[in-house]
Image (cartoon, helix red, strand yellow):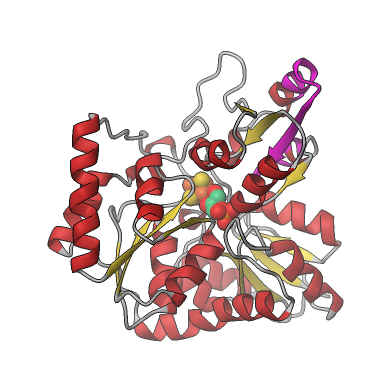
Amino acid sequence: MSSQTSPIQPLPRHPLSAADVPAVEEEHLTEVERDSLSARITALLRERDAVLVAHYYTSADLQRLAEATGGCVSDSLEMARFGHAAKARTLVVAGVRFMGETAKILNPEKRVLMPDLEAECSLDLSCPADEFAAFCDRYPDRTVVVYANTSAEVKARADWVVTSSIAVKVARHLKERGEKLIWAPDRYLGDYVQKTTGADMILWQGSCVVHERFKAEGIAELKLEHPEAAVLVHPESPARVIALADVVGSTTQLIRAAAELPNPVFIVATDNGIFYKMREVAPGKRLIEAPSGGRGATCVSCAHCPWMAKNSLRKLLHVLETGANEIHVDPVVGRRAVRSINRMLEFAGQSGIAVAGLSGD
Ligand code: 13P
Ligand code: SF4
């Protein structure tokens, strides 16, 4: 059946109940405990020929340690690139499961460990591979583009994988080639990409439980209070929030904006784990967390990803000591998925899009 003749029927949102979203865990450590754990982890990383690859949403302790031990702290695209280029035989991925799986898909010969295998992502959970494959089968003439925040099986069904740092560029490129798209799973990112590029896209209806809670009214009020502020927004946020943004971008792009824009104040609509790096690169600037619950409301996860928060120094030490929590990807699935991931990495390289960390671009 062709998309020309079939009515477009976006799937209803795959619902997540509040029970699917864990409480945010915080690791409380004394300075002595932190130093002792960090020293033991540093020694074990060396002994085990391992490198730590961490996302900006993990704790400051993990980010600091990744940098101090020659690992990397970055957005999801650069995490994939760094892990691929790293010489170490073991990659320890402090982030959420799709990041560990992507590392394994790109490096099947390496051992990939994660501090906590229950570190999920609501976007990944919203897009079961079998339902997604059936959805794609209804539109066989459409190019299937999936966000990195998906399972290995969903990536294996896709033609392209994208991350937030490259999504607009890939969609524009495909539009110029006359291709129509299926986009999954983030409906807000999809909506933003569709409006920005004018591409013909059918959107899966997933969402991020953290970003979808940011409130446009609260941000507008903050803007009135702080007319000198710039608003930095991750594109997993709702359209009304994106409409208020001075900069829309991936975590790396938002951190760079905080460093480079002249504004003395930033209202930041993304996970507050990002503040660790933003403070480092933009010292002296005031960073305000965008309101996520609305006045008087309670949010399930207020500006902090409960799955990213599952990563901790204690768990990291445990996996290095025991080799627990290894990521396995079915080799057949991995061989299919790697094509769509490599397409993105090659596109980034060919277009001269430097997606390296903060010193890149
Ligand atoms: P980035 O690729 O921008 O780091 O985003 C990953 C993510 O999960 C944001 O919620
Ligand atoms: Fe997924 Fe949202 Fe957490 Fe990012 S912040 S990992 S999109 S649930």
Measuring from the top left, give residue 287's x and y in whole percent. 62, 29
**Residue 320 in which image quadrant:** bottom left
Residue range highlighted in magenta? 220-241
* Residue lying at 56% horizontally and 13% vertically, measured from the top left: 296
* Residue lying at 82% horizontally and 66% vertically, measured from the top left: 199
Residues 21 and 141: in front is 21
* Residue lying at 54% horizontally and 64% vertically, measured from the top left: 78
- Image quadrant where one finds the N terminus: bottom right
Q: Can residue 139 be seen in this view?
A: no
Q: How many labels does the image show?
A: 0
Relative vertical location of residue 173 with respect to residue 16 in this rendering, above or below = below
Left or right of 292? Residue 335 is left
Relative vertical location of residue 176 with respect to residue 76 in this rendering, above or below = below
Measuring from the top left, give residue 279's x and y in whole percent. 55, 36
Measuring from the top left, give residue 153's x and y in whole percent. 45, 73
Residues 316 and 9: in front is 316
Residue 66 among those drawn in magenta: no
* Residue lying at 20% horizontally and 45% vertically, measured from the top left: 37
Relative vertical location of residue 124 with respect to residue 333 in this rendering, above or below = above
Residues 157 and 87: in front is 87
**Residue 20 in which image quadrant:** top left
Relative vertical location of residue 236 with respect to residue 5 in this rendering, above or below = above
- Image quadrant where one finds the C terminus: bottom right
Q: Can residue 96 be seen in this view?
A: yes
Left or right of 72? Residue 194 is right
Residue 237 among those drawn in magenta: yes
